[in-house]
């Protein structure tokens, strides 16, 4: 029931699921040359250029100039870098920054971008695209200059830590800092798939332990075996789930986890429920269930019979002693 609610409820998919992990940031700092911006009166521009980026694109529009420039930058970068996963960029109109989050399955692609950044090719092409696109939009002359920046340490971390981990190619919850809701979405999943069901399982286990050992439940009943399968195998399934969260937590904090370790832990996590399902359904086969029931009931009857015989023998001896 909890799985049904989890997979059909309004919170399904909360967080970000991706086969990419980690990120490389590309920051483009934009400036506009006021001397060549000749078609709009200088008094309406609010130069220097950075303050102009925060103004609406037109008197009748509430869209800031920076949002328009973001669209032009995003269109150019996605066409220029077709083999890179590029998220919608974030902007800061005060500083004139457009920040792209880059992710890829091949490090050579990220390396080429970094080399073009160092050579100045990327900034020159982006400046040309902005000047042409913005000038055409406003039917004016615009001259942009762009300075790009990338962190070599971040690139090294992406190559050595995140790319091996994402090499598995499985779409799972992204624990890396790219997922803004990683804490809340992870907490939601752990509570609904681990804490609640396994707490109920523990409660059933304690209840069955008390009833079994106080003799209140006959061990011949099939329901007893079903519950034992659930709480014993469920406890083992919980243990199999833990490595998955451990390795993702390690990767989230930039610790290296090999592709093979990720594969094993992910395989155990997604198949842990079989540890409960397989014994449960196997026991439902009549041949297995009845054989197990006969064995257990025969043992129980033997114990009860031996106990009865011992009591009868003690009673007879007591009667003989009293008569003497």
Image: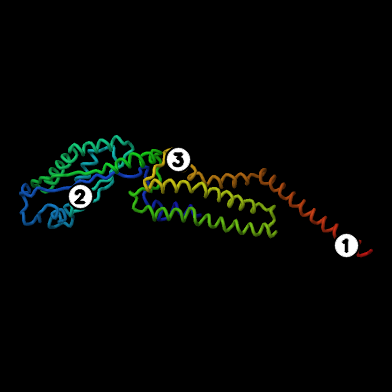
Which residue, given by chain and number where applicable, does mark 1 sit on?
318
**Front label number (2 vs 3):** 3
Q: Residue furthest bottom?
A: 322
* CA neighbours of label 1 inside 10 A, class few (<14), some (14 to 19), many (20+): few
Which residue, given by chain and number where applicable, does mark 3 sit on?
261
Residue 323: which quarter of the image? bottom right
Helix or strand or loop: what does disc 1 sit on? helix
Q: Disc 2 to disc 3, how far (Cα)?
A: 39 Å
Q: Position of residue 280 (x, y in %)?
A: 59, 47
* CA neighbours of label 3 inside 10 A, class few (<14), some (14 to 19), many (20+): some
Dot placed on the residue nearer the N-terminal end, 2 or 3: 2
Residue at screen point 66% across, 59% down:
211
Mark identifier at residue 97: 2
Dot placed on the residue nearer the N-terminal end, 3 or 1: 3
Q: Vertically, is 159 above or below 237?
A: above
Q: Position of residue 124 (x, y in %)?
A: 15, 40
């Amino acid at each position: 029931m909890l799985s049904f609610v989890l997979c059909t409820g309004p919170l399904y998919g909360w967080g970000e699921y991706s086969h990419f992990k980690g990120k490389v940031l590309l920051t483009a700092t934009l400036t506009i040359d006021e001397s060549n911006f000749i078609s709009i009166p200088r008094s309406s521009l609010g130069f220097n250029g950075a303050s102009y980026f925060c103004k609406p694109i037109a008197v009748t529009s509430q869209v800031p100039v920076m949002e328009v420039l973001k669209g032009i930058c995003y269109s150019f970068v996605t066409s220029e870098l077709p083999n890179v996963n590029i998220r919608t960029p974030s902007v800061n109109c005060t500083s004139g920054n457009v920040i792209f989050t880059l992710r890829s399955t091949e490090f050579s692609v990220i390396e080429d971008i970094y080399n073009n950044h160092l050579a100045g090719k990327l900034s020159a092409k982006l400046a040309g695209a902005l000047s042409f696109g913005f000038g055409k939009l406003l039917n004016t002359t615009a001259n942009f200059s762009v300075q790009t920046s990338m962190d070599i340490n971040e690139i090294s971390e992406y190559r050595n830590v995140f790319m091996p981990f994402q090499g598995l190619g499985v779409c799972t919850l992204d624990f890396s800092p790219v997922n803004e809701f990683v804490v809340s979405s992870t907490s939601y999943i752990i509570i609904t798939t681990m804490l609640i069901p396994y707490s109920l399982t523990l409660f059933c286990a304690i209840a069955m332990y008390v009833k079994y050992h106080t003799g209140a439940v006959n061990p011949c009943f099939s329901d007893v075996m079903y519950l034992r399968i659930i709480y014993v195998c469920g406890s083992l399934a919980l243990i199999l789930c833990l490595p998955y969260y451990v390795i993702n937590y390690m990767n989230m904090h930039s610790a290296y986890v090999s592709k093979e370790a990720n594969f094993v832990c992910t395989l155990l996590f997604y198949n842990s429920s079989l540890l409960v399902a397989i014994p449960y359904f196997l026991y439902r086969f009549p041949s297995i269930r009845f054989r197990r029931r006969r064995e257990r009931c025969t043992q129980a009857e033997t114990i009860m019979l031996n106990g009865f015989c011992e009591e009868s023998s003690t009673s007879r001896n007591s009667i003989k002693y009293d008569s003497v």
